[in-house]
Amino acid sequence: MDQNKQQLPNATATLVLGILSIVLCWIWGIIGIACAIIALVISKKSVALYNQAPDQYLGYGNLKAGRIMSIIGLILSALFIVYIIVIVAILGTAAFSLGSLLQQGM
């Protein structure tokens, strides 16, 4: 019965990229976003194949897990980018305020 089933294309690649998107989201967020988007794009065709004939394919669990991890990695990366922007804005405001104070004091 399982002998006629074939592995879903890109299921393992989606899983690996999903894991990488979570692991690499802390590197400025860009690498995590790239991995997550690539994983979601390459998994789209596999999901369509599986939905057409679920009895013919193995590995849907890996595909589903990879897609979920990609979404989580995408969210974490986006949050990290927002965090970086907020920190830069706070530091920029603090530096501007300090510069103004020093200028008034002299």
Image (cartoon, rainbow, N blue to C red):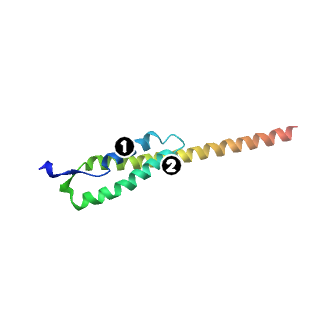
- Camera-near label (1 vs 2) is 1
Q: Which residue is drawn at 29% across and 52% down?
A: 9
Quick one: label 1, few (<14), some, or many (20+) residues within 10 Å?
Answer: some
Residue 36 locus on image (x, y percent):
43, 49
Instruction: Choose the circle earlier in sequence order: 1 or 2.
Output: 1
Distance from label 1 to label 2 (Cα)?
20 Å
The residue type indicated by label 2 comes to Ala
Residue 5 locus on image (x, y percent):
18, 51
Mark 2 = which residue? 78
Left or right side of 89 for 3:
left
Q: Residue at x 50, y 49 (%)?
A: 78
Residue 16: which numbered mark, if any?
A: 1
Name the residue at the left extreme: 1
Q: Nearer the viewer, residue 72 or 14?
A: 14
Q: Which residue is drawn at 56% across and 48% down?
A: 82
Give the image quarter of residue 103.
Answer: top right
Q: Which residue is drawn at 60% across and 47% down?
A: 85
Residues at circles 1 and 2 in contact by the CB criterion of under 8 Å: no
Q: Nearer the viewer, residue 14 or 100?
A: 14
The residue type indicated by label 1 comes to Val
Q: Nearer the viewer, residue 1 or 40?
A: 1
Quadrant that contains the C terminus: top right
Under circle 1, the secondary element is helix
Under circle 2, the secondary element is helix
Residue 51 locus on image (x, y percent):
25, 60
